[in-house]
Amino acid sequence: MERRKFVRNVGLLGSALVVTPPTTWSNSLCSNDSTYTPPAEVPLAEVWLDGPMRWAQLAFVERDPGHYDPDFWLNYFKQIHADGALLSAGGVVAFYPTEIPLHHRSQFMGDADTLGYLVEGCKKLGMKIMLRTDPHATRQDTLAAHPDWIAVTADGQQRRHWANPDLWVTCALGPYNFEFMPQVNKEIIQRFAPEGIFSNRWAGHGICYCEHCQRNFKNYSGLALPTKEERLDPTYRQWAEWKTKRLRELWLLWDAGIREVRPTSRFIPNGFPDKVLTGQESDLFFADQQARSGLIPPWTNGKGAKELRATLGNKPLIGIFSVGLEEEFRWKDSVQSDAEIRIWVAEGTANGMRPCFVKFGGDIYDKRWMDSVAKLYDAYYKNEKYLRNTVSLARVGVVYSEQTERKYGGQPWQQHSGDHLNGMYHALVESRIPFDMVNDRLLSADDLGRFKLLILPNIAALSDSQCMQIQSFVQRGGSVVATFETSLYDEEARPRSDFGLASLFGVSYQNKVAGPQRNSYLQLHHQPQNAVHTQLLAGLEDTPRIVNAIYKVEVQPTTAFASPVTLIPTYPDLPMEDVYPRVQETDIREVYLRQVGKGRVAYIPGDLDRTFWKMLNVDHRVLLNNIIDWALDEPPVTTIIGPGVIDSTVWQQEKSMTVHLVNLTNPMMMKGPFRELIPIDTQVTVQVPAEKKVSRVKLLMRGTEPAFVRRNGKITVEVRGLLDHEIVALDLG
């Protein structure tokens, strides 16, 4: 079976059934071909995948053996109700008495077994064990014995480690990973019988020019390795494709070797350059998106979770979060503020991730984070059944495109293309609209079945078949909102003469992208007697015009459209005496709305989403929200009333449904870390499924049962003093 089918058949992991795992694993790109045939049947009682909900990662440093107190950590794990442990095992340093030559054991360990003691203690606590390896660096003795295992720079020099010059960087795609690390994996599995191995920094650091990479890439492509990393360079794109395939072979090789020793165990890579393959190959996944840095908004953790869930489905997704700063200068023994930790973890949990804190080093210099994590984990432990989600109830899907990200660009108006998604994401958060992410390679009727609205924020590169899938979605009654150059390029980012979705948009491309549009505006046509105009311009009634987008695609309508928003062209912004519009009004539409069967389609030719992200102009957020509401054309599953910025998600569990509220209202929202949490009051109304009855309402994080109002199939509850994260839980009968 494919792994996706394997996990689907596992279901709730009942013990009465058995499953048949994949029959063969090939290693066709490895230096030594190998195959593996696992046992025919694996009892489901041995499959642990969906169990742990609260993880703890302790990343040892070489000095820890003999210097740290393992019982301190075991007591803490017990206190916080951690049921999964991610512990450092080997690679750069072995924290157990390894018998593999060149596998460097900690020089501080003596005759002890540092890892073994902690593993035994965790198992006595009933915790599941994932052991961590790091194969990205090695020592001088390895270089002397196997110089071809070391990464090589473009000028032919073996690569010293950038942070510790006593170490050498290994080649991720050569014999060190394909021949040496399988021995390490096997020894770890045989010795400790963990649930799996998680490998950090396993995928390499840039282009390696060692003899193996030169030969293998030449055999694959017929080309020499690219001389530098340029995303749009054809040779570099070939190399990125080859690297992805090579890493997949490595993933399967390591996983096969692990399963050969212990069939229920898994290999979990830290990151993989293709999210669809990640979803196909993983039975569970650890997302290593630890904390904010720079100008990263706090909802980024939720965004990463949404993107992974788009390909993983309901497979367990564990979110690794740091208790320290994640900044350029890497203060790894630092401590985040309590507020920052709570918001970051809340975003992950609200979006379906299971938390896993990571602490570097067994010695603790600053314990301020420990109470924060303990309080969070205690609340999650008490409410575990409400966090075992079965399905998201979001009706809006936002498409993200790895092929657009990798292959599209080059023109001035195509720079910062990821800001289209950021702008749309932020607008949805501010508008309090529950939504999920959709991978553009997963657009089948099954993939899109639960959505009413699909949003395409400049999904420029789409194949003909992908365009057909989107058209079929609309034919089935779905709606679409698309912006800018969506579908103007095929899956290889080759330009089309017209939109691939031209028949859906009702417009034709006029071979030009205008901009940057300085001092240009959107004319708003208020017609109270026209329902479309009224809905689209709600909240903008007191102005005849708002700021325009920066770039726009020139299009010609091919059918009749209403005209609530039209163009005021660019006019001089200096000298001051010349700042007046030369053209007062045009009939050039800047929003195209049409009914297509039972669905609705909105096409925005401007980069309104990207401009919103750049300027955060409130009028743009209002207009985007109105366009989305018009396209959705159904009552929302939740309505949230009150001040502030609140991210919301809606989930169903076996006997309940939950609404997660994450309070992002903070002056440090766009530049961390949060200093404090600012309480707000809000009112939440939830549409309950028609066949369900609500027996009880709870506010899980504060442990209370508030009064609620039941009216017309909806439940309304007041949430006073929302600090960081609240979960409104409805018990269903």
Image (cartoon, rainbow, N blue to C red):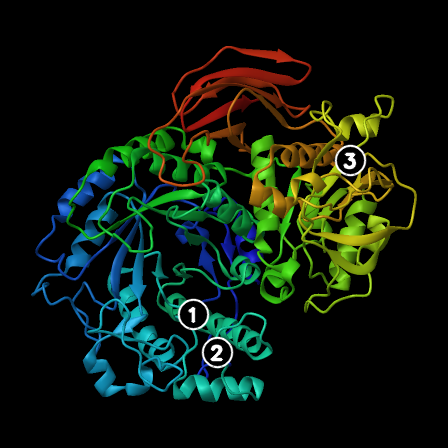
Counting from the top left corner in percent of width and height, residue 224 is at: 51, 87
Counting from the top left corner in percent of width and height, residue 541 is at: 73, 23
**Mark 3–mark 1 distance (CA, rounded to whole Å):** 61 Å
Give the crowd class for mark 2: few <14, some 14-19, many >=20 residues within 10 Å: many
- Residue 37 seen in the current view: no
Seen from the viewer's position, the closer of residues 278 and 548 is 548
**Circle nearer the N terminus (2, 1):** 2
2 vs 1, front mark:
2
**Residue at point 48%, 66% (across, down):** 40
Residues marked 2 and 1 touching at CB (< 8 Å) = yes
Q: Which residue is mark 2?
A: 27
Give the crowd class for mark 3: few <14, some 14-19, many >=20 residues within 10 Å: many
**Circle nearer the N terminus (2, 3):** 2
Residue type, mark 3 in image? Gln
Query: Could you tell me which secondary element the residue under label 2 belongs to?
Result: loop
Query: Could you tell me which secondary element the residue under label 1 belongs to?
Result: helix
Q: Which residue is mark 1?
A: 256
Counting from the top left corner in percent of width and height, residue 175 is at: 36, 82
* Residue 523: mark in rendering: 3
**Residue at point 51%, 29% (across, down):** 645
3 vs 1, front mark:
3
Residues marked 3 and 1 touching at CB (< 8 Å) = no
Give the crowd class for mark 1: few <14, some 14-19, many >=20 residues within 10 Å: many
Seen from the viewer's position, the closer of residues 128 and 211 is 211
Q: In the shown orientation, is residue 542 left or right of residue 372?
A: right
2 vs 3, front mark:
3
Q: In the shown orientation, is residue 126 left or right of residue 703?
A: left
**Residue at point 92%, 42% (across, down):** 560
